[in-house]
Image (cartoon, rainbow, N blue to C red):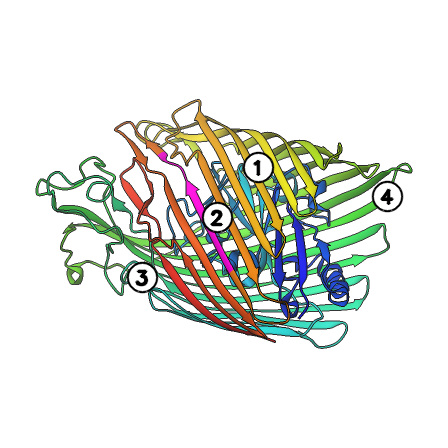
Amino acid sequence: MMTVRMIMLCGASMLVSSVNPAWAGEGADDAASAAADAAAEADAYAGGEETIVVTGYTGTKTDTALTELPQPIKIVTAEQYQAQGAISISDTVKYAAGVLANPYGRDTRVDGFNVRGLDALQFRDGMRDIFSYYASITSDPYNFSRVEIVRGPASVLFGQGSIGGLINLVSKTPDFTTRGEISLVYGSFDRKEVLADVNLAASDTLAVRLVGRARDAGTYVDHVPDDRVMFAPSIRWQPTPDTDVVLTGLYQEDDTGSTSQFLPIVGTFRPNTAYPEGRLGMYSFVGKPGWDRYNGRSIQGGGSITHSFSDSIKLSLKARYIDSDLEYFTHYTDSYSNPENPFAADGRTIGLYADASDAQMNVFSTDNNFQFNFNTGANIEHKLLVGLDYSWNKVRKRYAGGYEIIDLYDIDTDALLTYDPSGPFSNESQKQLGIYVQDQIRFYDRVSVVLGARRDRVTGSSGQTDNATTFRAGIIGEIGAGFSPFFSYTESFLPVAGSVQDIDGTPLSPYKPQTGTQYEAGVKWQPTPNTLITATVFKIKEQNRVLYGAGSSTTQSGVLNTKGFEFEASHILPGNFELLANYGYAKLKSETNTSLDYMPRHTASFWTIKTFGLADAAQLRLGGGVVYNGKSISTSSLWSIVTPSRTTVDALAEVNWNNWRFAVNATNLLNNKYFASCLARGDCFMGAPRNVMGTVGYRF
């Protein structure tokens, strides 16, 4: 059994993995580069062990070696986050510098990640796919070959987006090697799963891939299931060596609830002085069994076409349509009217809200560009990208709900009132049209410059229209001894629906888009092919935050400054021994009172994995990691709440024998029961307890 060693130069880390050749190259699978990757893999198979440098897409929308990009793009392969025991998209990014995964604990409703102190948006195959909270279900990590993290503003290539960064999911698509795997999983909270991923090369020009998961599971919160059915077929057709056509589909249905129970600070994080013995369990369920739920269905269809007219001209076309339905019924306590003392005089009774909503979301996105490769001198190479993208989304919601008083320590669940949404749906829609241009200039094969500009027009259902122009510029160069310093400037914008309001709620003027700028400087050091160290400092300025004042009044003058430092290092020792280390520091400072809930300033992680045994015999892989998140402070006019720092440990034990795989994953191995965050508004969110999963897989 030969071994393929893939070195993924990630701008801030180098991931190396030993992979069964029957399934090698998964981390490099991408609609834009699968053909080239497959050829590289074939060369590796023929020659035994070989190094493959994998290019990225998200940083520039072109196939560019990531060490030539003046920014730290992080790539996490499916193999890596599978080894780390990820069960959600949020889990896949927890071993990345400057990224806080699950900032409010594990949430079965939505994926959450915080990049450089700010919420990050989620994209799929380079196009945004979530436009409203609680209108869609979470994505399945098994459906993706890798997760890409862009830190800092990125509007020049992706339009409206997060100021802090974005997370891009890269779908699994076919290549021309027939192979497959099927796995059975059993784990904590009676988790039962079957997963399958089959790639069939029907001919030299046509391939089909089928990816699926069926899960029946509970969670650490009573009466909150985590059931899922996911099926993702895809087809690749290459009628000529210069033309690549990929069609993708997805059907996913989730039957779950909310592991976020919004428990009051008093009685959980802080003692209930009126009822001293009333300490609530950290994973208590507050609701009506059988009525509380988060059930949804998502259907997606998309495709891409790339065609090379010559070595100098390449056309890329992409489109996707999403149809999503969601039913979200939930209860949560009134911790907000009086956060310091939410209970009645008896210390037991408290207000309880019931919310029931139906949501429907439809999204159409398309991204199209031409790439021109040319020289303006013997040693000056250009990679010019000119593109146009368009997106349209429509979200329809309707609600019902009520309020009642309950004894939180002895809830009469049978007596709880229930509600059903009825009547007309509210409608919100948005259209965005963007034109972008980018030039990547390579001087003497040592210095790379990236210049870009974009113009956007965004129209909302209220008739509000926003126009924005954003820019980017960066430079990186090799100065010797493996050192490559870089500097970049990037911009971003995010439209804000609604209007500035007077104290009585009278609309005054439409909100302006939030805008952000970032300056970043750093250095990448690669003294040997098996070592890469990246250090970077950044400063982000965000403007036009919405501020809430007396009564219903709002203004839009909030400014947020973020300064930070990030460090990433990877090293491969002889004998398939891999080390990854990450650290991030971000300090947020608001010039006005924006009631921000500050994230931890310090995040750090360390992951290592070692393979024992011969390539043609049984192999044992042992892995372990530690994730640290520093304390966080949430402040209001009443009080400040400090959530303590928290540390979790993950572990892997895996045996690969012939085509069989036997693995045990454990996340939060030491079962640290901790608070992910407590907010001064009155509620707390719990981190997930220990989760253990055993897997038996067969690859062919």
Whole-angstrom CA distance, mark 1 to mark 3, is 35 Å
Q: Secondary structure at mark 1?
A: loop
Where does the magenta region start and end? 622-632
Q: Is residue 628 magenta?
A: yes
Q: Nearer the viewer, residue 101 or 482?
A: 482
Q: Is residue 11 left or right of residue 551?
A: right
**Mark 4 vs 2, N-terminal side:** 2
Kind of residue indicated by mark 2: Lys
Measured Cα–Cα span from mark 4 to mark 2: 40 Å
Quick one: label 2, few (<14), some, or many (20+) residues within 10 Å?
many
Residue 374 disc label: 4
* Whether residue 517 can be seen here: no
Q: Are the residues flagged by discs 4 and 1 in contact, CB closer than 8 Å?
A: no
Quadrant position of the C terminus in the picture: bottom right
Residue ID for mark 3: 224
Q: Amino acid at mark 3?
A: Val
Task: Look at discs 4 and 2 and give the one toward the viewer.
Answer: 2
